[in-house]
Amino acid sequence: MWFGIDIGGTYTDVVEFENFRHVMHLKTEKVMENPEILKKFDKCVVGIASWVRDNKILKAPNIPNIKNVNKLLESFKLENDANCFAVYVKHLVKEDNIIAITLGTGVGAGLILDGKLYKGRGLAGEIGHVFIGDDEKCVCNNFGHLECHFSGWRIKRDFGREAKREELLNYKGFKTLCIEISRAIMLLDVDVVAIGGRLGKIFKREDFSKIYKYLPSEFRPKIVIIDDELAVAKGASILAREMYD
Ligand SMILES: [Zn+2]
């Protein structure tokens, strides 16, 4: 049996390959108190909202208390959450070139290129931390990044609550996000741009057609919204199946 685990900012979910049965749902703070709780899932991949290189967590600004347990977590096979999301999107859309963007507390992207998950040296696709401008401090301790213009944490700070879709369409950072996605499309010429995550799923597909405005007409990747809270865990379970086969 293979398992995919999604350690998110608030909740941790576990699904079993291959019917994607949801086998565990608990608060991430409980996992941070006792990561041993995950040991029973022996053949598993852990998707986590963090910068992962060589199975080491370099940064995880949106996971509380991770410093206390990251050595323990590194005894698991770790994968960036957006990379797991991209693997699940490939499973759904059956295309070979995909940018899969997670919009949640932060902004991440996973890349499928020529049919394979592309990680570079581990951190490929960290579009939330490209420099846009201004001197707003980012959660990664640098300045002026995309997340400072559009992200769950920035929106929450501006609105003091969760924002509605209509509000976000007029929010100035949304245009910045669309421009950055168009730049990624120009760089990679993908078939599909998938949008997911807690914040991403409140949008409709046509909201992102704005991206086409910034692209030459030869670039028209399909845009899909993935409304599935278990998408990261499902992608992680697919990776576990590949890794432990
Ligand atoms: Zn940053």
Image (cartoon, grey):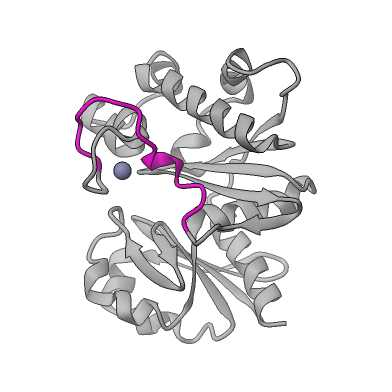
Along the viewing direction, whichever of 24 and 157 lies nearer the viewer: 157
Q: Is residue 129 above or below residue 32?
A: above
Q: Is residue 162 above or below residue 70?
A: above
Question: Residue at horizontal 63%, vertical 25%?
Answer: 205
**Magenta region, mostly helix, strand or loop?**
loop
Q: Position of residue 209 (x, y in %)?
A: 62, 18
Q: Is residue 159 left or right of residue 123?
A: left
**First to last magenta residue range:** 123-138
Along the viewing direction, whichever of 73 and 33 lies nearer the viewer: 73
Q: Is residue 205 left or right of residue 222?
A: left
Tell me where residue 11 sits by quadrant: bottom left
Quarter of the displayed picture in which ligand 1 can be seen: top left
Q: Is residue 208 left or right of residue 216?
A: left
Q: Is residue 124 above or below residue 36?
A: above
Please identify the quadrant where the C terminus is shown. bottom right
Does residue 230 appear in this view? no
